[in-house]
Image (cartoon, rainbow, N blue to C red):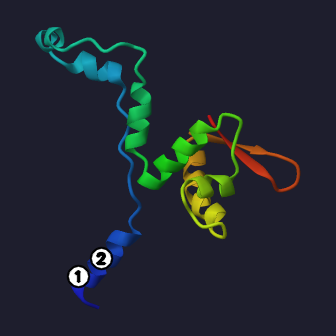
């Protein structure tokens, strides 16, 4: 086996490590006091945590999360795929992979309806 091919295979098999979200309050306390005076104050109404979370997501996961956020009453995987522009036949399977990861990260919650019907809502 060629060494370059072996290296490529090993890189594909390695799991992607997510960077840890840093608490903004800890970041500010570590800064020198003189530097704090020169920085403009950030209002507490701006969603800092949302931007940190979105940096850890793939573009597909971010797109699915945005679609789920737009539908407060819940949305099924097929509708998510259709809104993202997928074909009718593969829309549900396209969204399922991203939804599984978002469920693990507790960004989306799963609501089981009668039978095998499922809705996803923003957590």
x and y, in percent, of residue 32 in the image: 15, 15
x and y, in percent, of residue 101 in the image: 55, 52
* SS assignment at label 2: helix
Q: Viewed as shown, does residue 100 lie left or right of 61?
A: right
Query: Which quadrant: the C terminus?
Result: top right
Query: Which quadrant: the N terminus?
Result: bottom left
Specify the farthest residue to the left. Answer: 34
Within 10 Å of the Cα at label 1, are there few (<14), some (14-19), or many (20+) other Cα atoms? few
Residue at image location 21% in from the left, 13% down from the top: 40
What number is the disc on residue 15?
none
* SS assignment at label 1: helix
Q: Mark 2 highlights which residue?
A: 8
Residue at image location 60% in from the left, 57% down from the top: 81
Q: Are marks 1 and 2 in contact (CB under 8 Å)?
A: yes
Q: How many marks?
A: 2
Residue at image location 38% in from the left, 35% down from the top: 52
Within 10 Å of the Cα at label 2, are there few (<14), some (14-19), or many (20+) other Cα atoms? few
x and y, in percent, of residue 13 in the image: 40, 70
Cα distance in 3D space between marks 1 and 2: 6 Å
The quadrant in which residue 82 appears is bottom right
x and y, in percent, of residue 39 in the image: 18, 15
Q: Viewed as shown, does residue 72 lie left or right of 13?
A: right
The quadrant in which residue 67 appears is top right
Residue at image location 38% in from the left, 65% down from the top: 14
Q: Mark 1 highlights which residue?
A: 4
Q: Is residue 43 above or below residue 85?
A: above
């Amino acid at each position: 086996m060629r060494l370059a091919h072996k290296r490529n295979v090993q890189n594909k098999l390695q799991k992607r490590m997510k960077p840890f979200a840093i608490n903004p309050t800890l970041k500010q306390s570590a800064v020198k006091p003189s530097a704090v005076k020169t920085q403009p104050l950030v209002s507490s109404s701006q969603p800092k945590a949302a931007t940190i979370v979105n940096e850890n997501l793939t573009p597909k996961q971010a797109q699915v999360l945005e679609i789920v956020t737009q539908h407060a009453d819940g949305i099924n995987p097929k509708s998510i795929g259709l809104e993202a522009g997928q074909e009718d036949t593969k829309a549900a399977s396209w969204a399922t992979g991203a939804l599984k990861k978002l469920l693990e990260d507790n960004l989306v919650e799963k609501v089981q309806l009668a039978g095998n019907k499922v809705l996803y809502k923003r957590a």
